[in-house]
Amino acid sequence: MNGKVTLLGVPLDLGASRRGVDMGPSALRVTGLADRLRALGYEVEDAGDVDVPLPEECEPGDPKLKYAKPIADVCRTLCDRVHAALGAGRIPVTLGGDHSLAMGSVAGTSKFHREKGRKIGLIWFDAHGDMNTPQSTGSGNVHGMPLSHLLGLGDEALASIGGFKGKVLSSNTCLIGIRDLDEAEKKIIVESSVQVFTMKDVDRHGVSHVIDEAIEHASRGTDGLHVSFDVDAIDPSDALGTGTPKKGGLTYREAHLCLELIADSKLLRALDMVEVNPILDIRNSTAELAAGLILSALGQRIF
């Protein structure tokens, strides 16, 4: 492979209710990710970590939108760094950290292409919809709300990260791996017209059909794809080290195939790998899996 990659760590755990996901970037780095990417032929820059305050240093604020202000600050910084990486002709790979960081990473990708009069598509791998709003949430945890804010719903400040609302059209947004939705969230998803591929769809049609459909749907009329991958999309038998595991997820090979086919499409513009929690893991196996998925997304082949 030829190309340039920028690794961006975001040790963010303000959006989640379980501690430890802030160590995800370190867990991913110790797999030798940067050197393994170099072995694929990439020029790799590790830009270090975005500064994230500890929960003990912050006021939770609104119980329906916990830590919204510091999360927004982190996401604005990440937006700028993703935007800068793209401007330098690099592929930004964001290492998380909880999934609320995607409000910043996707904003940076969208802003870069928006300045050129173009749109992006979004493929979101997750066990959950991440489309609650402050009005629908039962927990107040922002990592259950990032996609709704990227679509322009919910809190004004979170929806306006990057200086504009609506980072991606619902018609170019796909959810894959879904198997755990809140009742109020289901209504939001239906009304949004986001394309949803549940695990039933994967079981019934096969993962290759699902990812082909998702790539076609998300890329239609766009300049490429931002892929945001929550490791809880994978079955906990393969990915134990995450805060909200749910049985019945993608297998190891299904997850790799999805990202291999995204690599084959040549449409990947930016990637997030989030919700790796080494405290809940065994021998860093989930981070090892996640690093392997990043390599698959960036072109590593079996043969």
Image (cartoon, helix red, strand yellow):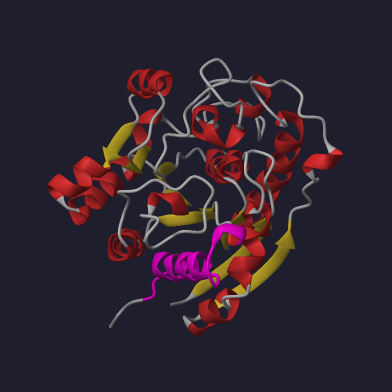
Write down the quadrant of residue 239 in the picture. Answer: bottom left
Q: Which of the pair 233/44 is nearer the observer?
A: 233
Q: Is residue 94 visible?
A: no
At horizontal 20% and vertical 56% (from top left) the residue drawn is 208
Name the image quarter holding residue 106: top right
Rendering coords of residue 273 (x, y %)? 52, 56
Quick check: 89 above or below 222? below
Position of 89 with respect to 221 (left or right) is right
- Residue 294 located left or right of residue 70: left
By secondary structure, the bulk of the magenta-drawn segment is best described as helix
The image shows residue 202 at horizontal and vertical percentages of 21, 47
Name the residue rendered at 54%, 63% in the picture.
281
Q: Is residue 149 above or below residue 249?
A: above
Please say whether residue 189 is one of the residues in the magenta stretch: no
Q: Position of residue 232 (x, y in %)?
A: 44, 50
Point out the stretch of residues depicted in magenta: 279-300
Residue drawn at 47 percent across, 34 percent down: 130
Determine whether 167 is above or below 218 in the image. Answer: above
In the rendered image, the quadrant that contains the C terminus is: bottom left
- Pick the front one: 35 or 145: 145
